[in-house]
Amino acid sequence: MLKHGEVNPLNVFGLRRIEHCPPHFEKLIFDLRATDKIITDWVYENLAGRFFYGDYYYTHNGQSTLSKCIAFEEVSELSYFGLFLDTINVNHF
């Protein structure tokens, strides 16, 4: 974890955040209130595993909706992130 001064090899080689969501990752869909940078910075500082962060489109009653999706390889990291989501995802404006 970055906040403890430990170097993560996945960060060094640019393998931590991936551009696609593999099927074995556990997902959490949410409406974004903060900025993308706040969310990803929190993940980099507090968690250690690989993750995906991106847009999630879905259609409900004929309307398309855009939400955010974050997915983790480790289920425990998804649980930890989910517990803190209400304190991270806050509109500061």
Image (cartoon, helix red, strand yellow):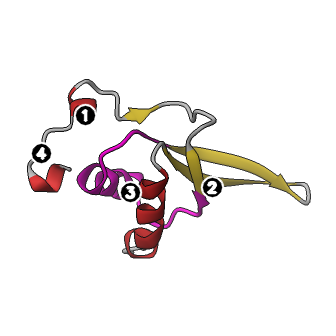
Q: Is residue 63 left or right of residue 38?
A: right
Callout 4–callout 2 Cβ contact below 8 Å: no
Q: Distance between the residues labelled 1 and 3?
A: 16 Å
Q: Which disc number belongs to residue 67?
A: 2
- The three-letter amino acid code for the residue at tag 2 is Ser
Callout 1–callout 3 Cβ contact below 8 Å: no
Which of the marked residues, 3 or 4, is nearer the chain's N terminus? 4
Q: Which disc number belongs to residue 6?
A: 4
What residue appears at the point 34 percent right and 58 percent down from the top-left corner? 38
Magenta-colored span: 29-52
Which of the marked residues, 1 or 3, is nearer the chain's N terminus? 1
Q: x and y percent of residue 34 in the render?
A: 42, 64
- The three-letter amino acid code for the residue at tag 1 is Asn
What residue appears at the point 38 percent right and 69 percent down from the top-left corner? 88
Q: How far apart are marks 4 and 2 (CA)?
A: 32 Å
Q: Which disc number belongs to residue 26?
A: none
Q: How far apart are marks 1 and 2 (CA)?
A: 26 Å
Q: Which of 30 and 74 is in front in this view?
A: 74
Residue placed under numbered mark 3 in the picture? 39
Q: Which disc number belongs to residue 11?
A: 1
Q: Which of 67 and 17 is in front in this view?
A: 17
What residue appears at the point 29 percent right and 52 percent down from the top-left corner? 41
